[in-house]
Image: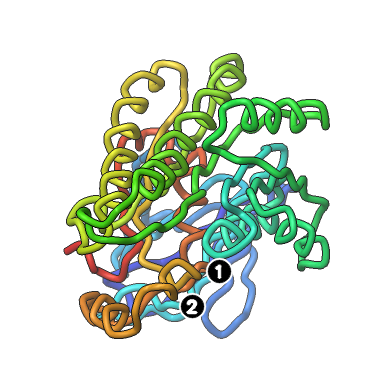
């Protein structure tokens, strides 16, 4: 187990305490990189327990944030005016977990799949596009992933995909419902097919995968389901009535299933990302630029910026968070 700590505001410097997996020695690394052996945190500290494995030590020079888990922390010098420097990173260990990501052959789904792969999980990559999945064989994966061709809008296809995964040795502990399509058009020109296709992939697809995942999660008393909605689901958008209805439906589905599954140790949350993907690139340039400028940060996020947020919702540290919609949008939803 690691014992890691970062000195936080109002201090303007930082340090890291660490305990190796073997042994009892504790070392303090100061900002010059020197190591000083210690057997315990500073005696002039008052500690309190938060969320089971999180401790805060209140010190005269600031606060010492201690995380006791398999989480590795790195940090850079803190700026008292800006808070934690952007170079601070937090990585999770999902070894022993099986993660299923839909719509994972490109964009956000692929970035999230790579995130869990780097974090030690066994990753199942589901997508409707067999050709795109085959190209992933040459991708930069740290361990063998499981590609599965699946049409999430078809319940039998989803059942077959889950059976194929189970036959390979495990069932999904974490499900990321990310598959999506666009069929834009104003309401009076929208065909029945374009309406139903978007609802089927987004809403029915999320339902199909969630339903299949629940028995295994219930049996083990633990599970994470993370659905993908969007800003449009809350605020609407011209020419996207079908997409807005689908994403709003996912929010209602997320909150309802969160209430149903909480007693089984299963959390259900949603993310609302504003990232540059192929779907966003299909939006007319003028409108895309307008959307970009609407975010206080003045840009779209990258798919890689979504993975860490999903990782947090999937972690043990987020065990008391369920039924929420987490914006990953550079302030767009403010």
Question: The N terminus lies in which quarter of the figure?
Answer: top right
Examine the rendering and report whether any part of residue 22 can be seen.
no
Q: Are marks 2 and 1 in contact (CB under 8 Å)?
A: yes
**In the rendered view, would you say 148 is above or below 274?**
above
Q: Residue at x 57, y 37 (%)?
A: 174
Figure quadrant of residue 186: bottom left
Q: Residue at x 29, y 53 (%)?
A: 190
**Nearer to us in this view, 115 or 37:** 115
Q: Residue at x 44, y 81 (%)?
A: 77
Figure quadrant of residue 246: top left
Q: Which residue is mark 2?
A: 87
Q: Is residue 159 left or right of residue 247?
A: right
**In the rendered view, would you say 315 is above or below 222?**
below
For residue 74, the mark is 1
**Nearer to us in this view, 104 or 120:** 104
Q: Residue at x 72, y 37 (%)?
A: 96
Expressed as whole percent of the image width and height from the top left, the position of residue 304 reads: 53, 68
Quick one: label 2 or label 1, which is nearer the N terminus? Answer: 1
Q: Is residue 303 left or right of residue 271?
A: right
Figure quadrant of residue 36: bottom right
Q: Residues within 10 Å of mark 2 (few under 14, many from 20)?
A: few
Expressed as whole percent of the image width and height from the top left, the position of residue 74 reads: 55, 69
**In the rendered view, would you say 203 is above or below 80?**
above
């Amino acid at each position: 187990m690691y014992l890691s700590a970062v000195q936080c505001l109002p201090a303007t410097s930082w340090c890291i305490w660490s305990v190796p997996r073997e042994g009892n020695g504790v070392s303090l690394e100061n900002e010059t990189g020197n190591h000083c052996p210690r057997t315990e945190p500073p005696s002039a500290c008052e500690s309190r327990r938060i969320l089971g494995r999180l401790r805060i030590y209140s010190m005269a020079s600031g606060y010492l944030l201690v995380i006791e888990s398999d989480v590795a922390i790195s940090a850079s010098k803190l700026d008292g005016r800006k808070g934690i420097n952007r170079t601070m990173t937090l990585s999770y260990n999902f070894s022993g977990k099986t993660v299923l990501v839909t719509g994972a052959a490109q964009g956000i789904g692929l970035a999230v799949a790579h995130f869990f792969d780097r974090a030690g999980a066994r990753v199942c990559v589901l997508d409707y596009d067999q050709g795109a999945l085959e190209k992933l064989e040459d991708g930069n994966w740290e361990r063998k992933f499981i590609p599965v061709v699946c049409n999430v809008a078809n319940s039998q296809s989803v059942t077959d995909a889950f059976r194929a995964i189970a036959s390979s040795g495990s069932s999904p502990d974490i499900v990321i419902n990310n598959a999506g399509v666009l069929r834009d058009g104003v309401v009076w020109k929208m065909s029945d097919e374009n309406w139903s296709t978007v609802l089927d992939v987004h809403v029915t697809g999320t339902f199909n995968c969630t339903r299949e995942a629940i028995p295994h999660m219930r049996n083990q008393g633990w599970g994470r389901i993370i659905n993908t909605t969007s800003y449009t689901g809350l605020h609407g958008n011209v020419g996207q009535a079908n997409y807005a209805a689908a994403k709003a439906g996912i929010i209602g589905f997320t909150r309802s299933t969160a209430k149903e599954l909480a007693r089984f140790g299963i959390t259900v949350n949603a993310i609302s990302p504003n990232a540059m993907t192929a779907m966003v690139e299909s939006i007319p340039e003028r409108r895309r630029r307008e959307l970009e400028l609407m975010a206080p940060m003045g840009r779209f996020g990258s798919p890689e910026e979504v993975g860490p947020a999903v990782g947090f919702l999937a972690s043990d540290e987020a065990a008391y968070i369920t039924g929420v919609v987490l914006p990953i949008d550079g302030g767009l939803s403010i």
